[in-house]
Amino acid sequence: MDSICCAFFVFSGEKEGAADGIRMIRKISKKRTGMQIRKLMNERGVTVMQVQDYLNIDSPQAVYKWLQGVNLPSVIHLHGLSQILGVTIEEILAEEEDVDD
């Protein structure tokens, strides 16, 4: 599985059925997010070791897994990445591309 799908609730002030209050949003691509993190790091001259140290991660393997699209960073790590890279979390996360049927 190389993506994650998220859902959010929309409240209108009226009680509705559970299915009526859920809308699907686009999936986050692990692979494209990893490529985006790598691009941002390269543009800013930030190394894996610097990310590891800044985020207080025991092993660089976690960072490499993000870069390879194996895993996504946790919310805490996304927040730290946004700080060290000087971008918003939205600029780090990459959505899946639309596939025409």
Image (cartoon, rainbow, N blue to C red):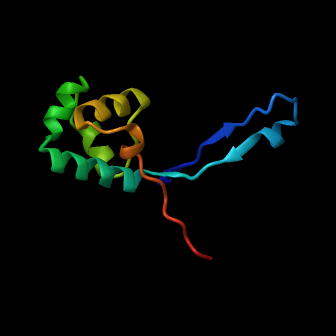
**In the rendering, at what x and y percent does residue 36 appear?**
31, 52
Residue name at image x 24 percent, y 53 percent: 39
| Along the line of sight, the residue nearer the viewer: 52 or 92 | 92
Looking at the image, residue 72 sits to the left or right of residue 68; the answer is right
**In the rendering, at what x and y percent does residue 95 appear?**
47, 54
Looking at the image, residue 23 sits to the left or right of residue 55; the answer is right
Q: Residue lying furthest front in this view? A: 13
Q: Quadrant of residue 15?
A: top right
Quadrant where the image shows the C terminus: bottom right
| Along the line of sight, the residue nearer the viewer: 38 or 43 | 43
Count of numbered labels shown in the rendering? 0
| Along the line of sight, the residue nearer the viewer: 18 or 16 | 16
Q: Residue lying furthest top in this view? A: 56
Above-or-below relation of 35 to 93: below
**In the rendering, at what x and y percent does residue 18 appear?**
82, 36
Q: Residue lying furthest bottom in this view? A: 101
**In the rendering, at what x and y percent does residue 11 appear?**
76, 32
Residue name at image x 24 percent, y 48 percent: 40
Residue name at image x 82 percent, y 28 percent: 13
Above-or-below relation of 37 to 96: above
Residue name at image x 15 percent, y 33 percent: 50
Q: Quadrant of residue 100?
A: bottom right
| Along the line of sight, the residue nearer the viewer: 14 or 62 | 14
Looking at the image, residue 90 sits to the left or right of residue 38; the answer is right
